[in-house]
Amino acid sequence: MRLICDASGAWRYATDLEKDTKGWPDFADQERRAGNVNKDIFYVFEDGEWRTAEGAEVELGACNGTRDGKVANIGKDFYTCASPRWRAATALEMDTYNWVAGEDGDVRNGFVNDAY
């Protein structure tokens, strides 16, 4: 059991988030860390504060405006940041993952579906 003194000077039970992130410095947005007490719970730093990670954020970090449109993968599963949450990537997004711009008329095999 952990207690915390709130802004009014009253003691109360600390939340899981407060226990797990106590003493953590501020990081850049999207930073992801496992909790200090609950090692199986992950948190992301977003908009100046830590919050519990959800879904793909557990592996990829927060999805926000600075990452909007970015495609990332967790193993064979691909996700696209559609701020404020990660969503399953489309076939086109998966196939063009990490490509640099080409020239008009270029033809390439897909990254995931190289038969097309």
Image (cartoon, rainbow, N blue to C red):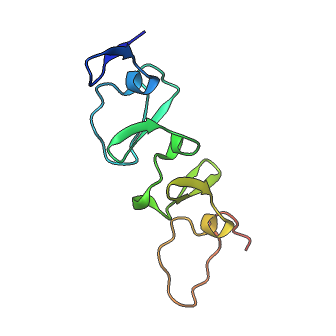
Q: For this rendering, which residue is in front, 76 or 59?
A: 59
Task: Locate residue 56, reporting x and y percent.
Answer: 57, 45
* Left-right relation of 89 to 7: right
Q: In which quadrant will I find the N terminus? A: top left
Q: Residue at image x 43%, y 19%?
A: 37
Q: How many marks?
A: 0
Q: Is residue 38 left or right of residue 56?
A: left
Q: Residue at x 48, y 53 (%)?
A: 63
Quadrant into which the C terminus falls: bottom right
Residue visible at 69% across and 68% down? 114
> Which residue is farthest right?
115
x, y percent for residue 106: 57, 86
- Name the spot of residue 103 as percent of width and height, x first: 50, 87
In the rendered view, would you say 10 is above or below 64? above
- Hey, which residue is sitting farthest bottom in the picture? 105
Query: In the depicted view, which residue is nearer to us: 110 or 52?
Result: 52
77 up-or-down from 111: above or below:
above
The one of 8 and 81 positioned closer to us in this rendering: 8
**Could you tell me which residue is drawn at 61 percent across and 78 percent down?**
108
Q: Quadrant of residue 78?
A: bottom right
* Percent of width and height locating residue 77: 64, 51
